[in-house]
Image (cartoon, grey):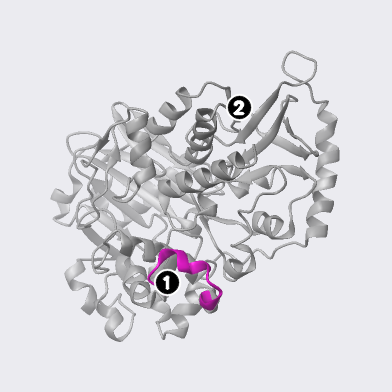
Amino acid sequence: MSSLILPASRRSFIAGAGALFATAAVAKPKAKGGGQPEKLDVIVVGAGLAGLNAANILESQGLKVAVVEANDRVGGRLRTGRAEGYYAELGGSEVGPLYGRVRNACAQFNVGLTDEGAKSMPFLLDIEGQAILPKDWASSSANHTIGAEREILPFLIQNRLFFDWVPFEDPADWLEPKYYEHDISAAAYMRMKGVSEAAIRLADVDLNGPSLDAVSAMSIFRDLARLKVEGFRDPTKPQYGAGNTNKSHYVVGGSDMLPKAMAAALKGRVMLNSPVAAVNQGADEVEILLHGGERLRARFMVMAAPFSALRRMVFNPGLPAPQANAVRGAIYSATTQFHFRVLKPFWEADGLPPSMWSDRYFERAFVMEGRGGEHGSLIVWMNGDGATRLNSMDLPTQRAFILKELAEARPSTKDALELLVEYSWEKNPFVGGNKHCFAAGQVKMFAKEMALPHGRIHFAGEHLRRMEPGMESAMETSEIAALELLERI
């Protein structure tokens, strides 16, 4: 289980930043081609949806903008893996029914949407080494939950319980101080409600966060309140996959087609492989120093990189205390995926449902119809601390370990799977995870202040979401940052 990262004091943060800046400054910054760096109107850091949306809005108002990105591709946490005609959504994938900004961007940049998404096949439970059909879970000897909990399938426990506990209807109310009493760890909240330890352990497997002990209950309540607005009313059904009722769409050709189109539409430079070492502010400009030595100057900046990336940057002057604490204390959910082509329908050999939900390391193995080959594909999907536990291994070693576990759980999978795509978000040094979460106590500590401008720097990104989830949160926060900035031009 992850422990809460305690925030550092502003003084200690600035002292550490000063030491790092002294090191970074040795890089002898230079402008492209020598001389003084060209002065822009706005530098955007981060080429995910948030950064690209901000850049397009600002360019549409006649401003001169450059985008810098630490990675070798645009898209941020929209990442599509491709192999032999197969594509794997490794990050954001669903365009929700109320994602108005994302849908508008798809229309603006001629990116198609479809309601034909991959669908997972029915599940087999693999708990304590037992293969259990969902209909038999309530009476299974592997079911150590108590009372009414016994009737809830393991992969529905978190939503089923928290759905009834959401303390507000308006998704914006999670920032109201009267709800701060709920800003405790999700596991502690469950214990307060009398939930058994067995149910907490099972619910932890499905959490898109480090662990129920680490994540604030407010993170879960905020997301469920927004899902209710979208029409999610039955927590006995999954949000995603087989049996879900969510009327989402998907980007034709892969989610990363949208950021690629947004980047291609920009007039200014989009600089890849350009991590930021330092950010210096003066009275009338912002200057950034890239690790390669190049400098860029602008009147303003939109910082659209995740807080995990900001920990690698030096700010001079240092960030205000709430933002410094938010950066230092930010937690992200690790996610690792392995996509395999199914070479033979192993479920026909053992007569069991194709997909698996397990308390083993691999956690979830979805068999997807119609993708990857004649028999579909199998996606192993590990989240949070479950993924972190294996990330000391390189991906080939993890893959071999997972295949061994799958074969132990279900011998019919042996020699039935062929690797197509694999990826670990935690291993990406400029991201460190696929979703920002608040640790217990962090909502009341700094959630309201962490998005405020710092001098000439405005902030955007999924970690700053207020009402919107997923892709839409990146678009929402970048729109806010761009409009704030335009008011100052």
Mark earlier in primary sequence (2, 1): 2
Which secondary structure lies at badge 1? Answer: helix
Give the residue type that dot 1 points to: Arg
Secondary structure beneath disc 2?
Answer: strand
**In which quadrant of the rendered view does residue 441 lie?**
bottom right
Q: Which residue is mark 1?
A: 201
Can you tell which of label 2 and label 1 is closer to the viewer? 2
Is residue 377 visible in this depiction of the protein?
Answer: yes
Give the vertical position of 383 relative to 458 (above or below). Answer: below
Say whether marks 2 and 1 touch (CB < 8 Å). Answer: no
| Residue 50, above or below 402 | above
What range is drawn magenta here? 168-179
Q: Is residue 246 above or below residue 297?
A: below
Q: Is residue 472 magenta?
A: no
Q: Is residue 170 magenta?
A: yes
**Whether residue 212 can be seen here:** no
Viewer-proximal residue, 463 or 487? Answer: 487
Give how far apart the Cα atoms at labels 2 and 1 are.
46 Å
Q: Give the label on residue 66, or none.
A: 2
The quarter of the picture where residue 243 lies is bottom left
Task: Check the picture and name the quadrant holding the N terminus.
Answer: bottom right
Residue sitting nearer the eye, 454 or 120: 454
Residue located 59% across and 39% down the image: 486
**Residue at far top of view:** 33
Badge 1: how crowded within 10 Å, few (<14), some, or many (20+)? some
Task: Give the residue drawn at x 45%, y 40%.
Answer: 423
